[in-house]
Amino acid sequence: MTSPLFPRIDAAAMASLLPFLVFVVGGLLVLLVDALAGKRRLPWAWIAAPVPVVALLAAAVRLGAVSGLTPRPTAFGGQFVEDAFGLYVTVVIALATLSAVVLSDVFLRRMDRYRGDYFALLLFSAGGMCLFSSSTELLSLFLGLELLSIPVYILSGFFRRSLESVEAAMKYFLLGAFSSALFLLGGALVYAGTGSTDLAVALRGGFQPGASGLVLAGGLLLLTGFLFKTAAVPFHMWTPDVYEGAPTAVTAFMAAAVKAAAFGALARALVVAGPSGVPTAAAGFLWWVAVLTMTVGNLAALGQQNIKRMLAYSSIAHAGYMMVGLAVFAATGARELLAAVLFYLLGYALMNLGAFAVVILWGGEKEEHLEISDLAGMGWKSPTAAVALALFMISLAGIPPTGGFFGKYLLFRGAVTQGFVPLVVIAVLNSAVSVYYYFRVLVALYMRPATRPMEYAPSVAAGAVIALCALGVLVLGILPDGLVPGMPSSLIGLVREAVAAVR
Amino acid sequence: MTQSTILSLVVFLPLLAGLALLLVPRQRVVFCRWWTLAAMTAGLVASGAALSMMQKGAAGMQLVHRVPWIPSMGIDYFLGVDGISIYLVLLTSLLGPIVVLSAWRSIGEKVREFHFLLLLLQAGILGAFLSLDLFLFYMFWELMLIPMYLLIGVWGGPRRVYAAIKFVLYTIVGSLLMLVAILYLYFAHHAQTGMYTFDLLRLYGTELTGPQQVWLFAAFALAFAIKAPVFPLHTWLPDAHVEAPTAGSVVLAGVLLKLGTYGFLRFALPLFPSAAHAAQPLFLVLAVIGIVYGALVAMVQTDIKKLVAYSSVSHLGYCVLGLFAFNISGFSGSLFQMISHGLSTGALFLLVGMIYDRRHTREIADFGGLAQAVPWFAATFVFVTLSSIGLPGLNGFVGEFLVLVGAFGANRIAAAAATTGVVLGAVYMLWLVKRFLFGPLVHEENRMMSDLNGREVLLLLPILLFIVYLGVHPGPFLRRMEPSLHATLTLSTPGPGRVETLRMLQLSTGSLRGSGTGWKAGAEGATAPRGASVPLLPATAPEFTAVVPAPGVMDQVLTVTASAFAVSASAVGNGVAR
Amino acid sequence: MEPWVEWTIMGGRAAVAWVIPLMLIPLLVWMERKASAYIQDRTGPNRAAILGLRFGGIIHALADVVKLIFKEDITPARARPFWYNLAPIVAMTFALLTFAALPFADVLRVGGHEIPLQALRLNPGLLWMLAIGSFGVFGIVFAGWGSNSSYPLLGGIRGSAQMISYELSLGLSVVGILMIFSTIDLNEIVRAQGKLLFGFLPMWGVVVQPVAAVIFMAAALAEANRNPFDLMEADSEIVAFHLEYSSLRFALFMMTEYVHITVASGLTVTLFFGGWQIPWLTTERLTGSAGDLALAVPALLVVLGLLVLLSLVLLAPTRRWHRTLQRLYVDARRHEAKFWTVVLLLQAIGALALGAYLFLNPPGADGLAAITAALQFVSFMVKVTFFGFAFIWVRWTLPRFRYDQLMALGWKGMLPLALANVVVTGFVLLLVGK
Amino acid sequence: MNAILFWSCAVVAVTAALFVISRRSPLASAVALAVNMVALAALFAGLSAPFLFIIQLLVYAGAVVVFIVFVIMLLNLGEEETRGALVSRGKLLASALACCLGLALLLRAVAAGTPREAAGALPADFGGIESIGQEIFTRWLLPFEVTGLILLVGIVGAVVLAKRGE
Amino acid sequence: MAPVGMPHLLGLAGVLFFIGVLGMLTRRNALTVFMGLELQLNAVNLVLVTAARHWHNLDGQVLAFFVIAVAAVEVAVGLSILIAVQRVRDTVNVDDLSALSE
């Protein structure tokens, strides 16, 4: 039946949306079950957990389907681009979502706020991330941004009896909404200057000599919007408060997934704008953003006592390292840097999820213990998890043989190739500073006497997340190229292919 | 190419043993100790085997094990050994079981973890000594950091956390900058040859402009100078030594510091010869300051361990001095000094640890007259002290003397200034002996102390034997290291000789074929056939075979000429002490 | 057309749209009083008179006006004067503005010109109704806020929550109509309702969208804050949002309520009951532009005749009633039937006279158009008045909801029902292949 | 567009906007916001966007502001008025400066030249409900569905955050 | 009066946007901050509609439509958060929210 109402939906377009659809439909189903269940308490996490798994599989299947395909399949008039790049980011998002779902199971049960709508919101947000990182069209980008952000605002305030939680939600909401307004103004100006909402058309054409100043202003505002989501200095102010106040499982989700989506989208936008689409001013701006982000994040993290807050500042710092990649890419157009950013994203997601998983596991019943000093002696009381946490900290600090190190190596390697040695030196000095506060966790774990008992039972699910993250971090660090040399599925090969696929 | 897996065995034996240890229930304390001792001993045997498998008189890399690891980046798993590294490997392996034995009683809690970390540390150190791929080297270099950090931080003294963090921060600042430099070198090499590789032997051939060399050398030198430690960067060392448990101190002083000087010898000097030569005056001055300053500060210490730690600063100064003499005497003296310092200072720390286990204090003022209570201990202590001072006939003398000879060849003033360090060394050590062992037995509790037991004798004995053996008969050692040192010296000297030497070295490992390719052509790199002949010293290069004329004669000359000097120095020291 | 004519016509349209709801106020007040009286079996007001003429009690409306104007105007000391004074004005203004988009007859085509018979000829007229209608909340909110007193504030919150909640059902129920008629131009919607279903049934909204009609009317009741949804002025339970008001400002609120009724009836009629349509007689047929010119005048006569018949039918019970009244009561109610008789007779005579006149002097095309418009206007007004009465009828018949029942009905009952209606309508439309 | 319409709407809109951010009473701000929105709606009508004109009235002025007003009443925010609702003078000055700077940059970008207007007459029914509907349900179908999702998320969020009980 | 074109309209939008920004920056009452946000979104819509008219291209109007919808959601969520805050803390003053400050 060809109805005029549904003119452009065909199987191919739907297939290209597959991971997005899985998330969204999964979220709707969870919501439906929630509505039908009434006041009954169902194992929500196990209802929701298959969704990211299926999305992961879908992304993997599609990754196989699109690899090497030209022209890239696009759906809905180019608003949604399906390529290896987007699917790779989707994989990261799906992994993060899966972990967040599993961790939330432990966390919400302990905090006695185990509800179905929470998981639906998580899945919706993941869907928004898929859209956000796979779109080159202003409206889809904006809607993806909103679909990604609004559930996270809500989830931040999910513990509505807790002052910290609602305060975090309020701060995140205000600044997030402000940033989307800036993003939107940027988009509107770009559209006003060029008459097109397609980033490729608008930005590529818009920076030709003699083009309107509107596009430049708009482009910078768009960039600002992206920088807010990536928590880059000077748009990072919300991060510590929100990370600290939000429920820990949500913080983990934010740190891993939101960051991945934001960097994915920003990287794609920079590619699509093309070397001519990024004016020198913007590239220079990014240079400074990278430097400031690293430095401010690391210096501020030094004094933190609360582990969530410390990880928040650390996430700012890591955004800075990734921004190094983007800044160099913006200045030179070397895609190698983007591959490094993609690699880093996965490693970063794994180590953060793992770290937050341990924090949740040790958080305690009803009341969380989140000071770094609360970890005292855990190394001997709960050695396995402590080793994992230590591994994540070492990885965050960028010490081999971990994914964190190899990611940094790739970034620095790329930047050095392009002659950005001062930038790399600054980054390296920052890494050295960061060792101090990451190792403080090790100090607490192993070198201080225990101060509190651990009477709650460990969780198998959270343990599995921790184990997988730890394994992933090690594999990324030791065998980034796969076990067999030249294996087509090697991660480095994959990210390179993904980056090459962006048009 | 015939690959040899013996080096991988040397490196991974401790690592695998350590991982296996984690599966043991933590209550099985005794088993952990025996297991570790067995693993360390096996490692020592493996190192010995490696030594025996080596071709004598060859300058190039031997027993190469090379497997592509991250081919898309041109990174190989690439181990090899030559006359330089084999002794450091042997030293490390020798100290392994000794360290385990030393911790037999003193480590009572978290035993399994302690031994796991020891094994991990061992693997890291050995790997760093044996890596010929810069990336792999960096991995092992950093891998040592964590176990050492935890050894100090968990089992250390009262200020252990401070000391541990200080140690890590110092090291990491240097090593991260080195990473940048490695990357830069990697790309400079790529720019010249179109090939991405971390193969050290290929990177030796990279031609760099003056400023490039200076910057890269600075980055490498910073990392190694911190580790060594060279004078203004040494401040982490006393803290780390004092707070570390005995086993940690022994490893730290015995082996870890040598990584710094080894790094200079293997990487910083041959990679950037012009810059290294330009920096020669600076490093000579720093080395001399380190020698004198270390000695002077050691003199005023009240804590025995701290005193020994500062003496390390002084002794490592000789190593650096020898390296920057840029002649074969300096180089071989430096390497010899590394080994002998590892033995004698290791032994000193062991002895201090033993006394600490008994009395739980290290203040010199708490002792005195120990010779009456524990005569065997006292005798051993005096013996080791003499070795450390550089008494002719013992190991310390050979290294110091060769270094000074080399330094005279390079810069007379520096050499003369460094000589005062010898005197000062005698002064503080002998003064220590006097206050520590002799005089009236003031503190009654010292009278009740037990003397060395069987285990302690067992662990000290090999060191003492080597102290004597190296001192009396250094020839074979020197002969073995000579060719490699000479090759390194040629590489470290800007000039036409480099190319030929380099070619020889590259031939020895098959590096000429290349392994990594990198970004654009990962696939070809991965499938490229690799292999080369067994590394042999080409017969056409006789200049690498025998450099030291008639080693036996040399020994005697040295012994005789220096004896008088040393005895007088000891006399002066005793006079000061009184 | 001359500009001044244009402006005049525009002004006229606006005036009509303004005057209708205002003029209906006294009528509705009177109906409210009388209907409630009859439902409760009492007389209702009937004492006020001018020169002895009581007009069935309708004079009371006038008396009320006079009273309210001359009452002392009190502004409470704690009130926030700005909001307090603004509230009734806002309420009345938006209520009146809403009515502006309703068509009270088809577009009048005279002399080659088209004169839309609605104050605001808007393409998205329906959305205008919804948009401006939602502004009505402001009046209540300002009143509650401006009074700065607990009970008015509570009334205001309840009222605004209720209006926000029911606006959803109201809007959604309309969607079905939009889908079926494929337009949101109100006049077009009404025109579309002139068609016949199965050849005989007028395609009124209520026929094609019965569920929507029910939802809409219920929601309209709630929007107008009429019983059973009059929680915010539920005098027996809490005190109303206009508690602190007196005199003319209070009068404005009362008038606004009746304007709301008019608007709600007008919209109900327009969307679901054929608006100005006279059943089976479309504009084309009446003006003869459909091709069967001959039909126009006889049709007119039929209509007029029907009116007469209606009057007579209505008269019969009035007579019986009159007799009953005479027997039962000794008060003024016994005279009321006389009044009604007179009214209906006059109506019938007028209609017949007009019919006869038209038969004797057949009008031209323009005249026919004008007459058509007039008839449609009458049809519209009759329907509106009837639904106005229905509102009153409901008020005095049904008990009031409790607040939670009200919210539950709105969110859990009507909203899903309205959604389901939209879905079902969509499927039906797909099946029908429209 | 019509200059009279523009200037009158502009004056009203800016004045109302200034009222929004300067009134102490949140209710006054809300009403000023409504006025601002109505002025913009009028501008939309003048810019050939009849559908948006009505949507602006319906959603913004009719729903958004009403909702804001409702919350003001619900939370009974009257007491807040008396306290200083403004920040310190220094911050105010700095913020104003920053905004002026931003505005100046933007205006400069605008003044640097705008592209030439598209040639030809506007298509018939430009901005009418049918043309917009055509666009939304064909080319912009995906965004439309996503918007639906966002609305759903908003509903769930409101329940999660603000529902009483439990 | 000078002819009114895109620069005028964009200028007006800019003024409104930055008035909104100023409101967000200077007001402490969260509700007023929300309203500043709404002003910004409105200004963006003005830009979009202006540009749509300028390019004879409906995309801008469609965008504005979606922006309006999303703005409604933002308000709903924001006000819900506000209500939650008020229940816990009894204030809507942004500066009073200091549980998370260092």
Image (cartoon, coloured by chain):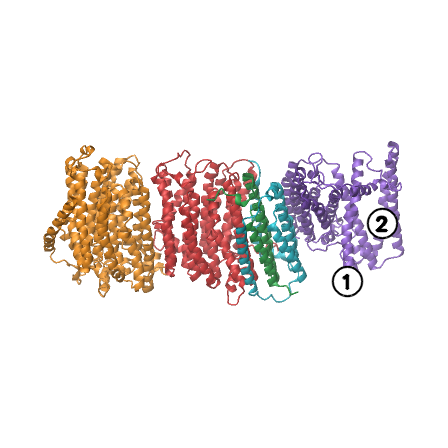
Chain colours: A red, B orange, C purple, D cyan, E green
Percent position of residue B426, x then y = 17, 47
As helix, strand or loop, the secondary structure at mark 1 comes to helix
User: Crowding near pointer 1: few (<14 within 10 Å), some, many (20+)?
Assistant: few
The label nearer to you, 1 versus 2, is: 1
Is C412 located above or below residue B225 in the figure? above
In front here: A371 or A149?
A371
Q: Hey, which quadrant is residue A382 in on the image?
A: top left
Q: Is residue A147 left or right of residue B390?
A: right
Q: Is residue C305 left or right of residue B119?
A: right
Q: Chain of mark 2?
A: C
User: In the rendered view of the protein, which quadrant contains the N terminus of chain B?
Assistant: bottom left
User: Crowding near pointer 2: few (<14 within 10 Å), some, many (20+)?
Assistant: many
Is A295 located above or below residue C69 in the figure? below
Q: Is residue B28 left or right of residue C44?
A: left
In front here: A184 or C177?
A184
Q: Earlier in the sequence, mark 1 or mark 2?
A: 1
In front here: A72 or D28?
D28
What residue is pinned by disc 2?
A: C304
Q: Which mark is residue A205?
A: none
* Labels 1 and 2 touching (C-beta < 8 A): no
Q: CA distance from mark 1 to mark 2?
A: 36 Å
Is A104 located above or below residue D1 in the figure? above
What amino acid is at disc 2?
Answer: Leu
Q: Hey, which quadrant is residue D141 in on the image?
A: bottom right
Q: Is residue B254 visible?
A: no
In front here: B553 or B392?
B392
Q: Which mark is residue C3?
A: 1
Percent position of residue B510, x then y = 25, 59
Q: Hey, which quadrant is residue A2 in on the image?
A: bottom right
Percent position of residue A217, x then y = 52, 60
As helix, strand or loop, the secondary structure at mark 2 comes to helix
What amino acid is at disc 1?
Answer: Pro
